[in-house]
Image (spheres, helix red, strand yellow):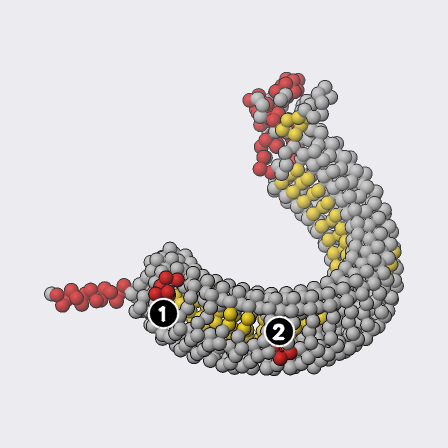
Amino acid sequence: MLAALTLASTALLVWATDFCPRTCKCFHNLTSIGCQKKGFHQIPKLPESTEELYISYNKIQEIPWRGMEKLQVLDLTKNQLHIFLSFNPVWPSMPKLSKLLIRDNGLKSLQPGQFLNCAALTLLDLSENQIKYLPVGFLRGLAHLKKLFLNFNQIQMLQVGGLEGAFALTELHLRHNYLTQIEESVFGNSTLLETLILSNNKITNLGDVSFRGATGLQHLDLSGNLLVTVPAEALKDLTRLKLLYLRMNNLTTLADDCFSSLSLLVNLDLSNNKLSSLPEELLRGLILLSELNLSDNLIDSLTSEVFNDLINLKLLDLYRNRLTHLPLDIFQNLTDLQELQLDSNHISVIPVGVFDSLSKLNELQLSHNHILQLHPALFTKLTSLQNLYLYDNSLQHLPKGLFHKMRQLREIDFSDNNISSLHHSVFHGLVRLHSLKLSNNRLSSLHPDQFRDLTGLKELTLDGNHIGKLPTGLFMNLANLTALDLDNNSLSELSPDDFFRLTRLKELRLSFNQLHDIPFNTFHVLRNLRRLHLKNNSLDSLHPQLFAHLAKLTEIHLDRNKLNHLQPDVFKGLTRLHKLSLKSNQLKTVETAVLEPLRKLHTVYLSGNLWDCTNTGIINISCWVKNHTDKVGDQPACFFYPSSPLSVHTPLSKPATKSPLLQEQCSASAARSPSFPLVMLTLLTAFLSLP
């Protein structure tokens, strides 16, 4: 009998371990278990088939010494294992474990041979702890370890022996620590190391042999440190290096031969430093370099030959330096260049021919300079250019032929210049152009053929100019236009033909002009319009058919006009309208029928009008506000005048809530039922609305 009970108990135990732990999720025939954020204080009983356990964001304080021998992946991120590890110098035996993550567990120290029982480890992540140093031999026994993550700790020094035992290490991540120095020969046995991330530390200098031994290194990141210079000897052994990041240091000078041994370098980032010049020999021999970032430095001049060897360069970034001029032949060998950033410098003159070798250039950024004029032949050889940016310069005119042969242009930005005239054919032939920005210039007139060939244009911004009238046919061929910005001009009238054929337009901006009246059929062709901006004009009325064909409209901005009345049908058919702004006009009353069609209205702005508390018609808008408080985006008020000062006011919804009789009338008004005598309503509205 006892034997039978024992056998039954054993069977029950085995049966129990074949089930997924309670509240956890199991996958792939119980080989992968997910127990994240369950509040566990200990690891639950696991199925015998478990190979991967993800148990992060719990309160686990210890690891069982048995039962986890088959694990291959163990994620213990955000638990409480610091005490367990401080009293147990060796991790429990997990001979098959290949990936171990102990991020954010409050670990303060490590022991020599800490993971000796995990000989199969290939990845170890100890990031986001409080580890202050790496003891000699803490990686002992990890002959297969390839990736070690120690980011966001408090490690102050890389000492000799700290990587002992990890002969197969290919990646070492130490960003965001307190490293001030790297001991000589610390990488003496790290011949397979390919990636070394030391960014965001406090390293002030590099020794001549800091990286000796790391002969296979391909990616070195020293960004965000305190380096003033980089000795050539420090990089001498890194002949296989492809990626070198030195951004955000305090580099002031670099020796001529600093990168002389890095013939395989592909990406070099020297941005956000204090370099005032580049030695002519600095980049000599870097024929494979593809990206060079020199942005955010203090460079005021460049020699003609400094980029001569960079025959494979694709990206050159000189953003935010102090360049005043460009040598004529500075880019002559950069025949593969695709992106050139020269914005935020002090360039005033660009020599003709300086870009002639850049036939593969896709993007040219010249914004935020002091350029006064552009020669018609300046861009002639840039036949592959797609994006051209020249905003915030001092240009006054765009000459004929400026974009000759530039058939690939997609985007042009000349905003924030002093352009007062455009040759009428300057944009001719640019059939692939998608975006043209001419905002904040001094244009007062445009030729009818100005945009004739821009059949692919989708965005046109002309805001912030002095345009007084739109010539007939100006936008005739812009059938693909989706956004047109004419804000902040001097437009006093619109014609029904102004927007002819703009059937795909989705946004039209006409705010801050001088419009007094808009013909009823001006917008009829704009059947796909979503957003219409008409604020800050002088409109005193709106034709009831003005928006009649704009069924897809979602926003109308009419604030800061002089509207004193709205026709009952003015918004009829706008069943998709979400936002309506009528604030800061001269409205005294509004009929219920005005807002009733707007079934999908989400927000309406009504403040800043002259809502008249003493007018019988106020009950309509008052009732609407009372019944739709969730849709009113501001706090409109009605006023008592002429007998009372204008400053005496009350919330616009108050006339509809003051009396049960008025509430009844409010409901009746909504139902279009005149159940309350008009004279009595007038008296009650005036009397009961008094503060």
Which residue lies at the image location 79% right of the left edge and 52% below the top edge? 440
User: Could you tell whether 314 is left or right of 628 in the image?
Assistant: right
Q: Which residue is label 2 attached to?
A: 244
Q: Is residue 237 above or below residue 327?
A: below
Quadrant housing residue 674: top right
- Say what secondary structure mark 2 lies in: strand
Left or right of 283: which side holds 49? Answer: left
Residue pointed to by mark 1: 89
Spatial CA span between label 1 and label 2: 37 Å
**From the image, which quarter does the N terminus lie in?**
bottom left
Q: Position of residue 426 (x, y in %)?
A: 85, 62
Residue at 63% in and 21% down: 690
Q: Residues within 10 Å of mark 2 (few under 14, many from 20)?
A: some
Of 434 and 377, nearer the camera is: 377
Name the one closer to the observer, 424 or 111. 111
Name the residue located 65 percent from the left edge and 69 percent from the top edge.
Answer: 228
Residue 271 x %, y %: 67, 67
Q: Nearer the viewer, residue 173 or 657?
A: 173
Q: Which mark is residue 124?
A: none
Which element type, helix, strand or loop, lies under badge 1? loop
Q: Residues within 10 Å of mark 1 (few under 14, many from 20)?
A: some
